[in-house]
Image (tube, grey):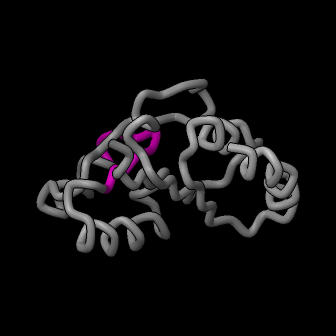
Amino acid sequence: MKDNILIIGGYGKVGRIISKHLTAAFAHKVVIAGRNFQKADALASELDHKAIAYSLDISNCTDIALLDKTKLVIMCIDQKDTAFAKLCIQKQVLYLDITANDLFIEQMALLDQEAIDN
C-alpha cells in the first residue's frame, strides 16, 4: 500500500520542520531520509520513533523499493538534475519540491506532460 511520506533532506533546516509537523499528523508513515543515516535516526529518536529513518543518496539511485510504499515525496534538498523526480513520476508517486532554484524549476516544468501521462 502506498501510504508513506518520504521527506528527503528531512533532518535539515527546512526538512526538520516539515518532518515534525507531518509526523505529528501521520505517525509511523513519515520516512526521514538523507545521506546521513545518523542524522535521520537522531531526528526519528527525537520524535519518539514515530518516524522512520532511512539512508538515501538520490544521486546514486536509479530504483528504490521504498517508492513502492510511498505516496508522496517532499524534496528538501537542492538537486543538479531531475532524475529522481522522473523516477517518482514513473512510480506514480506524488512529488513536491521545496526549491527556489529557477533553473531547476524550469527543468521540472518540462516534466509536466510525463507527470500527466503517469
Query: 2 or 63: nearer the eye?
Result: 2
Question: Is 37 displayed left or right of 76 in the figure?
Answer: left
Residue at x-position 57% and y-position 43%:
92
Give the percent coordinates (x, y) of residue 25.
26, 73
Q: Is residue 55 above or below residue 62?
A: below
User: On screen, 19 above or below 115?
Assistant: below
Residue 80 in view: no
Reply yes or no: does residue 36 show up in magenta.
yes
Does 59 sit above or below residue 78?
Answer: above
Picture coordinates of residue 42, whole percent (x, y): 24, 52
Image position, residue 71 (x, y; %): 44, 51
Quarter assignment of residue 21: bottom left
Closer to the camera, 99 or 4? 4
Q: Which residue shows up at 62% across the image and 66% down it? A: 98
In the rendered view of the protein, which quadrant contains the C terminus?
Answer: top right
> Does residue 10 appear left or right of residue 95 in this picture?
left
**Which residues lie in the magenta part?**
30-39
Residue located 64% across and 36% down the image: 90
Horizontal side of residue 106 vs 58, given as left or right: right
Task: Report how many numbered discs are placed on residues in the image.
Answer: 0
Q: Is residue 98 visible?
A: yes
Vertical order, 114 against 105 (above or below): above
- Residue 61 lies, in percent from the top left, at 57, 26
Residue 46 is left or right of residue 63, and the answer is left
Looking at the rendering, which quadrant does residue 1 occupy?
Answer: top left
Name the residue at the front extreme: 117
Which residue: 85% across, 51% down?
107
Q: Is residue 13 magenta?
A: no
